[in-house]
């Protein structure tokens, strides 16, 4: 099994970012964008082929994807978007809505056969109180290989404000950047782990609580150096 060998970096940027538009591409820090692999909005009234809904409610409405937990599930709302990748650049917009938003996660699972592990690979976890980059537990060996927070921020994420999330994944390195469209907030999280280089079959989305909206998902290959 992979053990520690974890490189941890987390830098927190104060409220000095420039305002953004919905179409803006956040500047990458460790990769260059290559071929555009996915570009998806939610102007229709149904999800396109390639979405898998496990828990909760995920509905295109008003030009965005609205997600919320359902009490009967007793589980975070969870959905996956099929897209086989390895190294990549991922950008989307999200905002907390509703009376009691609790969190939004964006992450990945290892493709079958890539790791001797059962469970997720890693996620960027965003909460009203901040953000974390987490390496997920091996569900078959939870004591030996538990959840590990590799980087975190305690900068608040305001509700009813659109934020851009940029995730770069190259080899064992991951960088995540969160920036509000009104320019009030910017967070940078970076980390490395020896399991992160693997292939991933889907994009994984989770919503905690009663309100997250997602829009303008774009994914690129990493350009060759």
Image (cartoon, rainbow, N blue to C red):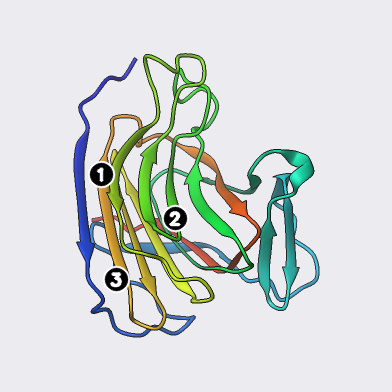
Residue 217 image label: none
The correct choice, above or below, for 151 with respect to 161 in the image is above
- Indicate which label's residue lies in the foreground, 3 or 2: 2
The first of marks 3 and 1 along the sequence is 3
- Label 3 vs label 1, nearer the camera: 1
Circles 3, 1 touching at the beta carbon (< 8 Å): no
At a point 31% along the width and 19% down the height, the residue shown is 2
Q: Residue 146's x, y, as percent?
A: 39, 24
> Comparing marks 2 and 1, which lies closer to the viewer?
2
Residue 172 percent location from the top left of the image: 29, 38
Q: What is the distance, in whole Å, between disc 3 and disc 2 at their CAs?
A: 20 Å
What is the CA distance from the residue labelled 2 to the residue labelled 1? 16 Å
Q: Residues within 10 Å of mark 1 (few under 14, many from 20)?
A: many
Residue at mark 1? 191
Quarter of the image where the N terminus is located: top left
- 14 left or right of 86? left
Q: Earlier in the sequence, mark 2 or mark 1?
A: 2
| Residue nearer the viewer, 166 or 73 | 73
The 10 Å Cα crowd at callout 3, few under 14, some 14 to 19, many 20 or more, is few
Where residue 126 is drawn, which disc sits there?
2
On the image, numbered disc 3 is attached to which residue?
27
The answer to whether residue 74 is above or below residue 93 is above
Quick check: 196 left or right of 66?
left
Query: What element does badge 3 sit on?
Result: loop
Among the 4 quarters of the image, the one containing residue 128:
bottom left
């Amino acid at each position: 099994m992979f053990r520690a060998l974890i490189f941890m970096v987390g830098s927190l940027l104060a409220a000095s970012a420039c305002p953004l538009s919905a179409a803006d591409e956040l500047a990458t820090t460790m990769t260059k964008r290559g071929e555009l692999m996915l570009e998806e909005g939610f102007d229709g009234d149904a999800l396109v082929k390639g979405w898998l809904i496990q828990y909760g409610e995920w509905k295109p409405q008003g030009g965005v994807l609205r997600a919320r937990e359902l009490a009967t599930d007793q589980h975070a709302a969870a959905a996956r978007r099929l897209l086989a990748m390895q190294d990549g650049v991922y950008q989307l917009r999200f905002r907390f809505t509703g009376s009691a938003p609790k969190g939004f996660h964006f992450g990945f699972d290892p493709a079958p056969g890539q790791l001797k592990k059962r469970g997720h690979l890693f996620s960027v976890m965003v909460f009203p109180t901040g953000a974390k980059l987490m390496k997920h537990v091996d569900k078959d060996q939870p004591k030996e290989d538990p959840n590990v927070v590799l980087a975190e921020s305690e900068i608040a994420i305001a509700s009813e404000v659109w934020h851009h999330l940029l995730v770069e994944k190259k080899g064992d390195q991951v960088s995540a950047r969160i920036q509000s469209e009104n320019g009030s907030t910017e967070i940078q999280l970076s980390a490395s782990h020896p399991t992160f280089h693997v292939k991933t079959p889907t994009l994984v989305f989770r919503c905690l609580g009663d309100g997250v909206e997602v829009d303008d998902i774009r994914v690129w290959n990493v350009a060759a150096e």
